Image (cartoon, rainbow, N blue to C red):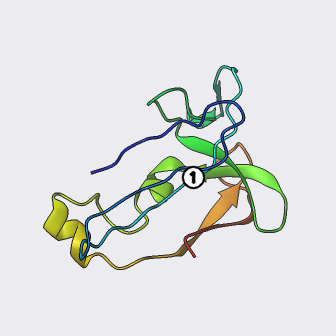
């Protein structure tokens, strides 16, 4: 189960509590949203930042080398496989990490890597 939390202005922490013996995992993304419209590249792919629960084809990120670029949303969402289907499935999942290619807005010119996980 995936849950999205939005921090209030000035809030910088979120707390979670679980019953003893329950295994859990937190995956997080920091998103600095700005109210802009998505652009579309020559391949017809949208690029920009999340809008509520809508995602562009290419999401804005900062690569490990400091470059600003875009990762394919499908690549970002596929890290670790499909979302857990129930608590039992969640309990057996192992933490994952992955490196995802970062591109210019054209979706083809690679400019860096985005690291997901620990």
Q: Residue at x 42, y 77 (%)?
A: 95
| Looking at the image, residue 89 lies above or below residue 45 | below
- Quarter of the image for residue 112 reads bottom right
- Left or right of 81, for residue 88: left
Neighbours of disc 1 within 10 Å: few (<14), some (14-19), many (20+) = few
Which is nearer the eye, 25 or 103? 25
In percent of width and height, residue 51 lies at 54, 27
Quadrant into which the C terminus falls: bottom right
Position of residue 28 in the picture relative to residue 62 (left or right): left
Q: Which is nearer the eye, 85 or 42?
A: 85
Q: Nearer the viewer, residue 100 or 4?
A: 4
Residue at image mark 1: 29
Q: Nearer the viewer, residue 60 or 111?
A: 60
The image quadrant that residue 108 belongs to is bottom right
Residue 101 percent across, percent down from the top left? 63, 65
Q: Residue at x 58, y 43 (%)?
A: 58
Vertical side of 16 occupied by 65: above or below? below
The outermost residue toward the front is 20
Q: Secondary structure at mark 1?
A: loop
Residue 80's spot in the image, x, y percent? 38, 69
> Which residue occupies 24% across, 60% down?
84
Above or below residue 93? Residue 85 is above
Residue 53 point in image, percent of width and height: 44, 30
| Residue pictured at 52% horizontal, 40% vertical | 57
Whether 98 is drawn above or below 40: the answer is: below
Left or right of 18? Residue 100 is right
Answer with left or right where residue 62 lies relative to residue 81. right
Residue 22 location, quadrant:
bottom left
């Amino acid at each position: 189960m995936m849950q999205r939390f939005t921090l209030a202005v000035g809030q910088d922490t979120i707390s979670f509590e679980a019953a003893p013996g329950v295994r859990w995992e937190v995956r997080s993304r920091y998103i600095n949203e700005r109210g802009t419209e998505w652009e579309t590249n020559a391949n017809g792919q949208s690029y920009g930042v999340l809008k509520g629960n809508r995602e562009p084809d290419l999401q804005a990120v900062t690569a490990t080398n400091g470059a600003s670029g875009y990762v394919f949303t499908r690549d970002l969402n596929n890290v670790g496989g499909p979302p857990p289907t129930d608590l039992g499935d969640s309990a057996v999942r192992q933490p994952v990490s992955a490196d995802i290619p970062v591109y210019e807005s054209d979706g083809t010119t690679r400019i860096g890597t985005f690291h997901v996980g620990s």
